[in-house]
Amino acid sequence: MLQVFNNLFKTLHAENIIFCNWKDHHAIDRHLNGDGDLDLFVPIGFKAKFEEIAQLEGYRRVISYQANHDYIEHYFGLDHATSQFVHIHVYFKIITGEHASKNYDLPLENYILKNLDTSSYLPTINIAGKHAIFLIRYFLKIGSIYGLFQYWRESEKYLNEWHSYDHAFNFESIVELGISRNELNEMNKAYESPSFFKKLLLSIKLKRKLKGLRRRAYFWHQIFIMQNLILRVFNRFFLRKQKILIPGIVVAICGLDGSGKSSVVSTLEANFSTHFCTKVFHLGRPASNTFTFFFNLFVAIYSFLKRIRVAKQVALLATPSKNISLIYAMRSVLLAYDRKTQSNKAYSYSRNGYMVICDRYPGLENGKMDSPRIPANESRGLAYQFCYNLEQKLYRSIKQAKFIFHLSVPLEIAIHRNSLRNKFGKETEDELRERFFVNSDAKFLGENYHTIDASTSFSTVLKQVLDGVWYSKNWN
């Protein structure tokens, strides 16, 4: 069992919170080691206290974009030792039925509590209760074409769960649902029968019996299924959204060349995008927008031709001369505008529940990396003064990143790492030395600022960033 689960269960027991694993019992060992989703039942009366404990233990609630149901919530935790994400489905009521719609609200709290098995650290349901609930879930799932399709996709999982049960027991009636012992025995025989027609008839019979427990009437249920199907198809092929964070967040990885920031950004994206809606923005060299595209293209060509004419000219963006050209000043304003636009987009995504990871982030110290580039010079003309004031205004209007992780390395390590990079147009050693001299004390716009020694191993740096984001009390 991963420590992130152990810590949660320990606190729940200490606070006398009732909870148990209520389905997918065959895979419990795999789930407790972080493979798959753990399904817990927590009575609705303990909901507020459970949420408080989960947050204290480092779990964060998320929303499923295509499968969001009342009384079912998703929590993700990060195991400190392994840096592995874990996922818990928490049912505050037994909401079940067809996979996509879960159209039945079954009043099974008392039944589960009567059949609770507390012999293990993670409480579960006794043999008879597991078996009976499995049969009810199965026959509620297969009563429609869409339900069958969803079931067949996971049929192997249900077979494995069925075969994991000890079948040598006698059913007891489920008074809460009005289902007798004989009816459960009939369902049991039908499940083991090769006749699918018999299964289908029992499914229809059970659904009629539980009609009063439906969450949606027949017509509205069909409408919901169609809408959900369209949503799933659209999401699968176009949106490709994962879980939505509550709230989303903007995290920036900053540092000089050779500090490892690009590797950290790409690995963070890989880790988070597996589970959550994730977006990466590059604010060091931001993408041009519609307004700046053509001018930036013209200036880029002009700068390229100028570098060819002037041999070994080091045109460092962070160290402008006081005699910069008006073209350079205009380009600096457009760069500030692009950074402002990209930071606005980053926060727009975060407001929609995204984990936004920024490769570099603006600062306010004139002449430093990713900061204003136009020097103050009162002797220059009105056009220059306009560019200077506008650039300052744009940078000061950029919202701070929620978290800045500033990776710091000694110059010689940065030079060595840069020599190993396979990158077109990478910086020369002289350029790196100049950048290091100018930017060693640069600071960037962040509410929560973390400076990390990036001369250690990559795994150590990555772990510090992951833990710094996930376990922070300043996320919300």
Image (tube, grey):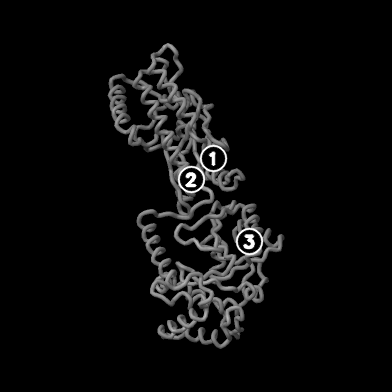
The residue that label 1 is drawn on is 402
Determine the image quadrant of residue 381: top left
Task: Please tell me which residue is depicted at 43% across the width and 34% down the height of the picture.
Answer: 340
On screen, residue 120 versus residue 268, left or right, reads right
The numbered dot on residue 47 is 3
Q: Where in the figure is residue 50, as x and y percent of width and height?
A: 64, 59
Residue 334, visible in the rendered structure: yes
Q: Amino acid at mark 3?
A: Lys
Is the residue under label 3 in contact with that under label 2 (CB below 8 Å)?
no
Q: Nearer the viewer, residue 293 or 309?
A: 293
Q: Nearer the viewer, residue 240 or 161?
A: 240
Q: Where in the figure is residue 154, as x and y percent of width and height?
A: 44, 70
Give the spatial CA distance, label 2 vs label 1: 10 Å
Badge 2: how crowded within 10 Å, few (<14), some, or many (20+)? Answer: many
Badge 3: how crowded within 10 Å, few (<14), some, or many (20+)? Answer: some
Q: Secondary structure at mark 2?
A: helix
Q: Which sits earlier in the primary sequence, circle 2 or circle 3?
A: 3
The numbered dot on residue 350 is 2
Is 451 drawn above or below residue 160 in the view shown?
above
**Where is the N terminus found, in terms of image quarters?**
bottom right
Q: Nearer the viewer, residue 66 or 471?
A: 66
Q: Amino acid at mark 1?
A: Lys
Q: Which sits earlier in the primary sequence, circle 2 or circle 1?
A: 2
Is 116 drawn above or below residue 244 in the view shown?
below
Is 9 drawn above or below residue 134 in the view shown?
above
Q: Where in the figure is residue 261, as x and y percent of width and height?
A: 47, 38
Is 222 drawn above or below residue 303 in the view shown?
below
Q: Nearer the viewer, residue 457 or 204?
A: 204
Is the residue under label 1 in contact with that under label 2 (CB below 8 Å)?
yes
Q: Secondary structure at mark 1?
A: strand
